[in-house]
Amino acid sequence: MSERWVLNASPVITLARIGYERLLLDQPEEAVMPQAVAAEIGAGPRSDPARQAVQGGRFQVVQVRPLPQVLAWDLGQGETAVLSLALSEPGWTAILDDRAARKCANSLAIPVKGTLAVVILAKQRGLIPSAAEVLRALQAAGLRLDTQVIRSALERGAGETWE
């Protein structure tokens, strides 16, 4: 497994809310979080599980210099840092859910995966027994995913159904 992931706030926050942030650490060979993302998560409530995980040292935090071609998209600081690292270092995949950031990634040919893909991959790799169960918990925790997209991904990627 030679995957390297650079993590944005949304996947960390939503997976930590349901106790599954480990899916971001257990799958790739290496996972890092830009300082801008750590700061964004650290500004959350003290009781936030993602904040506790970041402050507890669960994630490797790195400094990232924003690249002009990413800055031109006027994204948030976290998304800009994630995409700048993934663009400047071949072999890194951006893990993010933000629609505008995904458009930027696609236009710059940056590999990108969202929380849905992280969960489907975890099921394929035997890290979780049910992708549908995790996705239901994520929806209950506030992650907005289109039902048709979930249904399709579950059927194709995990051999599961969405009822």
Image (cartoon, helix red, strand yellow):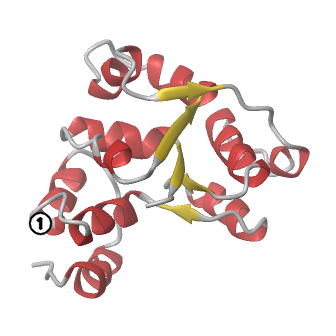
122 relative to 75 in the view: left or right: left
Residue located farthest toward the front when viewing the structure as drawn:
1
109 relative to 132 in the view: left or right: right
- Which residue sits at x=55%, y=26%? 61
63 or 132, nearer to the observer: 63
Give the answer, above or below, for where 50 lies relative to 102. above
> Neighbour class for label 1 at 10 Å: few (<14), some, many (≥20)?
some
Counting every numbered tag in the picture gives: 1
102 relative to 123 in the view: left or right: right
**Position of the C terminus by quadrant:** bottom left
149 or 116, nearer to the observer: 116
Task: Residue 52: give x, y in percent of width and height.
Answer: 31, 18
Task: Residue 124: give x, y in percent of width and height.
Answer: 25, 72
**Position of the N terminus by quadrant:** bottom left
Give the answer, above or below, for where 96 lies relative to 71. below
- Which residue sits at x=75%, y=54%? 87
Q: Quadrant of residue 100?
A: bottom right
50 or 122, nearer to the observer: 122
Q: Quadrant of residue 39?
A: top right
Residue located farthest toward the right when viewing the structure as drawn:
68
Task: Residue 16: give x, y in percent of width and height.
Answer: 27, 36
- Which residue sits at x=23%, y=86%? 155
Name the residue that disc number 1 marks: 130
Task: Residue 114: give x, y in percent of width and height.
Answer: 45, 60
* Secondary structure state at the residue bearing disc 1: loop
144 relative to 75 in the view: left or right: left
**Amino acid type at image mark 1:** Ser
103 or 119, nearer to the observer: 119
